[in-house]
Image: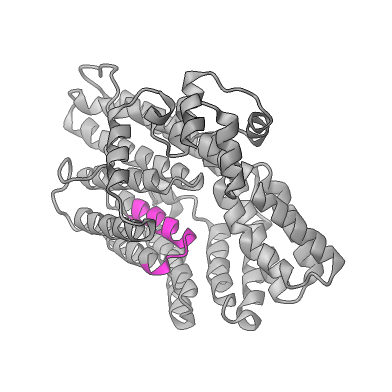
Amino acid sequence: MRDALARRDVSEIYRQLRRHGVSQRQIAASTGQSQSEVSEILKGRQVMAYDVLARIADGLGIPRGYMGLAYDGATAMRVAKAANAPNAEEDESVKRRKFLSHAAAVTMGAAVFGEGDNNWVPTSAQTPAPARIGMTDVQQIQAATKALRDLDYRYGGGTCRDAVVAQLSWAQQLLESSAADPVRKQLFVALADMHSLAGWTSFDIGLLDPARGHFGKALEFAKQANDDGLVASVLYRMGRVYLHYQEPNEALKLFQLGQIAAQESGSALTVAVLCANEAWAYGMLNKPDQVQKMVGRTKDEFARAKADEAPDWVRFFNENDLHGMIGSAHDALANFDPKRHASIAVAETIKCNEAYGADMQRTHVFGLSLQATNHFRAGDLQEGIKVGRRALQFGDLVKSARVADRLKPLEIEAGKHRMNSDVRDLFEEVRRFRQG
């Protein structure tokens, strides 16, 4: 691999990855390329453009110096850390503890802004910042964040993550500009929201360390702005990262920490979102009584919430998402007791899947795969086949590494019924999709 990197032989680099079990879909998601581009490169197409080579190196976590590219400070830091890293499992455990410690310190009011040994501070760009900024400059950041978040919802983080990071590099320079206090406070809010989006899109394409770094900075900016609702948002999103990686205990700690900020924010809808996610975490821990308690509280908070008074980040949580989250909690419990919970998960996810539109395609894929999985658990094979194929159809439209991961339970459940030829066909289709 080092020889291939030195030659900048991307075709051989990709072939090495494929031989070690990395799918074309995973390569595409990590490097920001389409699967067709990856396929062409595997067939021998040369990559010569410097910016594409740099993006491939960064996306795959390869120090640029290995490819003879510019060896910047961030790369040097990453190489130095890699040289001293313990084994991967211990390293990830340490990282989780450090992030939780940082999150607790920020949420509970410790003065961490600009201090400490956090290595998630992005490298400053060289373009000079304007001497003075006003609210219009901040509104431009907010507009860019909204547009990019819409792309993420619709097509996945792979379509916009690079653009978010590029916008963030420019936006952070405004910290060097003079501004009135209200403008500066709003700038902190805007930067927190953009870092949060950078974290979410990084997570969506499988870049865990960059995601954690951006969420860490988002927490700091949100706390600097005294925006408890935004603090709750960041903690909710990082908790979802840990749920995805099957770490419900770690996720629950972040959701509970976020609940403190949510209560302080005074937004019932924000509290409802945190409660719903706590229910999901308890489901993964096989604690049905706690799930029932948190689902009940979620419904109560949702009923008294006024969406038009809620922060922008939480307005996505409507009745469809309420049913989707309840379905997710029962889906988690169905892993332990399918007879009791699979039918409930189906009923709840049907309610949300019928209402999702093209603006929420990634969430629709997740909901359909969850519904199909529980049709199989409940013994309704024909519905499982029909809904599972719809999930695959929508999955082809989304650039998200999470789609393949979220289809794994469907592959497992379909695999239990391979004596049925139609189910066996779906099982093979899901397996091929997940392998890229």
Quadrant of residue 188 in the image? top left
Nearer to us in this view, 140 or 113: 113
**Is residue 32 shown to the viewer in this render?**
yes
Nearer to us in this view, 339 or 433: 433
Nearer to us in this view, 40 or 427: 40
Residue sticking out furthest to the right = 421
Image color mode:
one colour
The residue at the point 44 percent across, 64 percent down is: 277
Q: Is residue 246 magenta?
A: yes
Q: Is residue 189 magenta?
A: no
The residue at the point 55 percent across, 66 percent down is: 328
- The number of discs equals 0
The secondary structure that most of the magenta stretch takes on is helix
User: Measured along the vertical axis of the image, is residue 141 above or below residue 244?
Assistant: above
Residue 341 picture location, percent across and down? 61, 78
417 displayed left or right of 112: right
338 displayed left or right of 125: right
Residue 98 picture location, percent across and down? 26, 56
Residue 316 picture location, percent across and down? 49, 50
User: Measured along the vertical axis of the image, is residue 197 above or below residue 246?
Assistant: above
**Is residue 371 shown to the viewer in this render?**
no
43 displayed left or right of 165: right
User: Measured along the vertical axis of the image, is residue 7 above or below residue 410?
Assistant: above
The residue at the point 46 percent across, 35 percent down is: 2
Residue 358 picture location, percent across and down? 65, 43
Q: Which residues are magenta?
A: 232-249
The residue at the point 64 percent across, 75 percent down is: 342
